Amino acid sequence: KIDDVQVHYQDKKNSNLTYFFGKGDYSTTPMVSGSFFADNDFNSEVTVALVGKNIAKKLYKPKDQDYLKVNSGYLPVLGVMGEKRSSSSLDDQIFISGAISTLKTLT
């Protein structure tokens, strides 16, 4: 039985976009703000995103929730990835979570 797993799929059209699925203990990603994915995020029909610091500057921000525009829709953003005091390879990255059924609608 596999208890801890993570799967990454990099989008062919946009190399900064990565689809992410995880279960168990799977993350050591540094966060500037917000939170990383939880197991429930992969079972939900609502697809959510994590973004790097540079992407965070371009988000749609009504009231208390940030949103990322993907194709013709908007995804709620859980958090901003990266190092607080320096740049990192995560600054221009987007991670999108979801069940396999919801990922199929985005690709």
Image: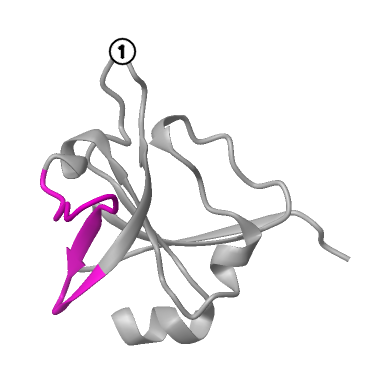
What amino acid is labelled 1 in the image?
Arg
Residue interval drawn in magenta: 58-74
Query: Which one is in front, 54 or 9?
Result: 54
Q: Position of residue 34 (x, y in %)?
A: 42, 39
Residue, x 30% and y 79% (percent of image)? 106
Image height of 79 relative to 13, above or below: above
Which residue is found at the position 49% from the left and 87% from the top? 101
Residue under numbered circle 1? 85
Left-right relation of 64 to 49? left
The answer to whether residue 22 is left or right of residue 91 is right
Q: Residue at x 29, y 66 (%)?
A: 75
Element at label 1: loop
- Which residue is at 47% across, 30% downward? 30
Q: Where residue 103 sits: x, y (%)?
A: 41, 78
User: Where's residue 40, x and y in %?
Assistant: 62, 65
Residue 14 visible at all: no
Residue 77 percent across, percent down from the top left: 33, 54
* Magenta stretch contains residue 21: no
